[in-house]
Amino acid sequence: MPGQLLRPSGFRLAAVLLVGVGIAGCSSTGERMRGALNAITPYKVEVVQGNFVSKEQVDALKAGMSRQQVREILGTPLLTDVFHANRWDYVFTIRRQGVEPQQRRLTVFFDGDTLARFEGDTMPSEEEFVATLDTRKRSGKVPELQASEDELKKFKPAVSASPTQDLPRSTQPLPPSYPPLETR
């Protein structure tokens, strides 16, 4: 009996090999497999944080502007540091499914109540930013949505002699007088 337990049968050997191949296969998922898994992932919500600052807004900033003027142009800053009261940070991030996350930063420095300088990433114009938002796949040709008179004549129904005669009883118009709802 003890010798029989030590000798691997064909079934045990096949089971061990199958488990080994399964474990090795799970550890070697390649780029192709990840692409297939990404195609069947559930919808992920678009996450937008901060204020979008455009190139046009940055171009409107001039040294010497007051804090209120800067706030009117750029909006409320995402971060106002308690320890650095002369610095406002504008950070914008957007994370969308199927698109690389975008992050843009702009830091505005004040000297007292006036704008001293600003630095940050190069900002896209509003048109460029809007163009990056549209990720729908474009179809080739847009169909014409208006029919000509000739095309409309093809679909006009033929006029019958008596329109109510051919209709089933349930679709015929009701008589002008109706029976009472309650009996007296």
Image (cartoon, rainbow, N blue to C red):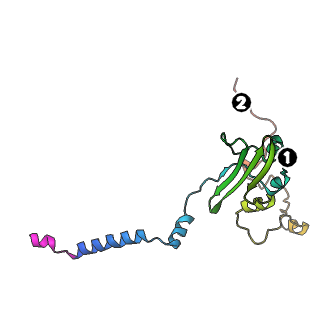
Q: Who's the residue at 62% across and 59% down the image?
A: 97
Q: Residue 131 carries which label?
A: none
| Rendered location of residue 82, percent (x, y) | 66, 39
**At label 2, which amino acid type do we have?**
Leu
Q: Tell me the CA gap for discs 2 and 1.
A: 82 Å
Q: In which quarter of the image is the N terminus?
A: bottom left
Question: Element at badge 1?
Answer: loop
Q: Which residue lies furthest to the left in this view?
A: 1
Q: Who's the residue at 50% across and 70% down the image?
A: 33
The relative height of residue 54 versus residue 19 in the rendered view (above or below) is above
Q: Which of 139 and 66 is in front in this view?
A: 66
Q: In which quarter of the image is residue 163?
A: bottom right
Check disc 1 and report the residue beneath it.
64
Q: In which quarter of the image is residue 180?
A: top right
Q: Residue furthest front?
A: 111
> What is the crowding at mark 2: few (fewer than 14 residues within 10 Å), some, or many (at least 20)?
few
State yes or no: residue 5 in magenta: yes
Q: Who's the residue at 80% across and 60% down the image?
A: 127
Magenta range: 1-9
In this rendering, the count of numbered labels is 2
Q: Nearer the viewer, residue 101 or 155?
A: 101
Check disc 2 and report the residue beneath it.
181
> What is the crowding at mark 1: few (fewer than 14 residues within 10 Å), some, or many (at least 20)?
some
| Rendered location of residue 81, percent (x, y) | 67, 42
State yes or no: residue 159 in magenta: no
Is 26 left, or right, of 132 in this rendering?
left
First-in-chain label (2 vs 1):
1
